[in-house]
Image (spheres, rainbow, N blue to C red):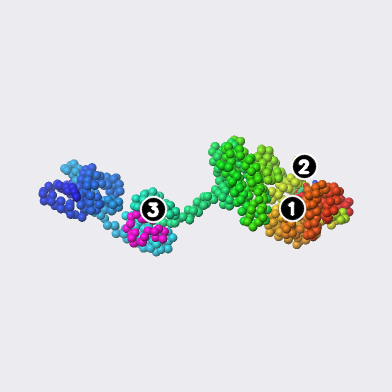
Amino acid sequence: MQSGAPAAIAAGPDEPVAASPLHAAYSRLVWDTTDHALCLLDPEGRVAAWNPGAERLTGYPASEVLGRAFAYDDSPAGSDGALTAAREAGRYETDGWWPRRDGGRFRARTVILAIRDGDAPAGFAQVIREAPPPSEEGGEIRAVALILDLALSTMSQGLCLFDADRRVRLINQRFFAMFAVGDGDALVGTSIEALWALALCGPGAGLRDGAALLAGHAAPLERGEAVVVALPDGRAVALSRRGVPGGAFVVTFEDVTRQREAEQEIARLAHHDALTGLANRAMLWRRLGESAADGTVPAGSALLFLDLDGFKAVNDDLGHRAGDALLRQVAERLRRAVPEPGLAARFGGDEFAVLLPGRAGELAVSLAEGLLIALARPYGIEGQRPRTVTASIGIAFAPGGTTPDAMLREADCALYAAKGAGKAAWRPFTPALETERSEERRLEHDLRRAVEAGELHVAYQPLVDLSHGAVNAREALLRWTHPERGAVAPRRFIPLAEKSDLIRALGLWVLERACRDAAAWPDAARVCVNVSVRQLGDGSLPRAVGEALARSGLNPWRLELEITETVLSHGGTGIVDDLQLLHAMGVRISLDDFGIGFSSLARVRAFPFDRIKIDGSFVRDAVERPDCRAIVGLVAELGRRLGIETVAEGVETPAQLAVVREEGFTEAQGFLFGRAVANPVPAARAGT
Ligand code: C2E
Ligand code: CA
Ligand code: CA
């Protein structure tokens, strides 16, 4: 192997070169046999001579380095700086890293001497001695290792300690449990690249893969950030690196697969409804916003809002699991019906929405028609007879210039109108609907202060005993005289009050007033007070009734509470408790508007009713329509069987009176006997 021995070596700038044959032989001996790596550089820093010691230490044969600038300290700048320093000072000594031909590195002390030929620089001589690791550095690693040893066995993370040469010094048990990498002792001394390949790159990976992976994550790791590596086996492992004084460092490995999956699931859930898998409100909102890149929804787009009619009854009757099953089937039918590129979403509860972006909006009406039919088909629920619900649909169209906000509001407004129009229908949004809606809001606002303003009063309508014609009871009916509008019908303002909690305050006001008025009547007629379902279920009504009775001195059995059939479909235990409590106090309970709701006979028996009032619509038609007459007869029969009294509402003509009497009703109410009046007592006297 050619080693390019120099003719002479000068040791310092001031010593003249002695060019004797002896000197030359001596030089060659030193050059060839010393353990030190020696190397001569020309004035430009290129290798001019390279001794066997240098070959042994670096692994590079002279042939590969002669004539090249041999960089050390990881960067050419490192060697350049050292040469400049040596040129200026004559001698420069440094500790640094040298590359090895096998890809490794070694730490060495390098002495650089500047060589001069007279005044002109002739080059440099370098003496390279491999430095043993500084003793205090080794001591620190040992100390750290000791402390770590204690913690290591109990850690939930895998851990590797690397020395300053980036070779494995220590690995804990958890690491071996996480990665199939053989046994511990064999790995000590392995380079970080090799370990990375073994642990993180999967079977068959080599040093190159390890180095590439390492390079990809080096920067954030150096900054102390955690890096998540996806393993070929599907796991996700979080790596983080902490430095130890002296150049060593620790890398921890944590299996974050579950956490990753949870994060992905959370991200999915953030945009999907967990129950049905449809998009959720947030997703629909995002798509609507994306379609409106310029702030307005593209002309032609349509948004459908859907709400199920009668879902609550299914939910209350059959339980939440059955309700959920039904909602999933609704979602499935929606998914199948909505054309590309439409988006079906669940808004929560039994509310759904469909976005038909751009030209797809043309399909809105036919989709709505189709959905009304598809969603009204019976739903099979495990262990139950098939149930039906219907849908109400509101549609908003974007004529151009509509914002996503306005679109949602308009679809909602149209849905409200569809519900108001008797449900199981679709309605398009029109500006008139919005006017109606704001009109309602104004009315509700006025109603809120009607009590204090003294605009409310109670009127009483008689209920007559059909066997002897006496006034048995009077129904308290709320009246509102609006300062500008005049009399507002209860059919208009009661539903408004029932949408908010306002009905509770109004109901209590009527109760209080009715008890006081009835206590002053000269006869012993009952007073019937309408109670909204919103007043029931939390125990507050029995308390309020107790107080009203105590304050007025009215006998409990003279008070009758009228509850509509919808109470039966709510059916919460709180409601039954309240009714039972009221019953125990001696108060009567009657079932109002019977026949128009969803009541089943079984449910009627579950509540302590004293009376059933058949809805006026059946009575009105009973004379002409046999089917209505049949229902009137059935209700009377039901009352007799259950031992419950029956009241016929809405009796306006003698013919109607004849029918209800014939069918065996016990009481009747209607314009034939008298309308509701503010002060009923003279009428009551006249009747007796
Ligand atoms: P309702 O409980 O079914 O009350 C009977 C309604 O039928 C009353 O209407 C009454 O005036 C009307 N009516 C009575 N006899 C006849 C008749 O022969 N022919 C016709 N066509 N109608 C008759 P009103 O007073 O307009 O009340 C409407 C509804 O408002 C009531 O229906 C009741 O559900 C509700 N309501 C009234 N006052 C209150 C109240 O204080 N609290 C609650 N929660 N609801 C009330
Ligand atoms: Ca009533
Ligand atoms: Ca009624």
Apparent side of residue 201 relative to residue 543 in the rendered image (left or right): left
Residue 685 pos. (x, y %): 88, 52
Find numbered disc 3 in the image and state the secondary structure of the residue it sits on: loop
Residue 308 pos. (x, y %): 65, 48
Q: Quadrant of the C terminus?
A: bottom right
What residue lies at 68% left-to-right and 53% top-to-bottom?
313
Front residue (pair 202, 516): 202
Q: Which residue is mark 2?
A: 486
Looking at the rendering, the stretch of residues picked out in magenta corresponds to 176-205
Q: Which residue is mark 3?
A: 201
| Mark 3 nearby-residue class (10 Å; few <14, some 14–19, many ≥20) | many
- In 3D space, how far apart are the residues under numbered discs 3 and 2 (Cα atoms)? 83 Å
Q: What amino acid type is highlighted by mark number 3?
A: Cys
Front residue (pair 503, 186): 186
| Mark 2 nearby-residue class (10 Å; few <14, some 14–19, many ≥20) | few
Mark seen at residue 564 = 1
* Membership of 200 in magenta stretch: yes
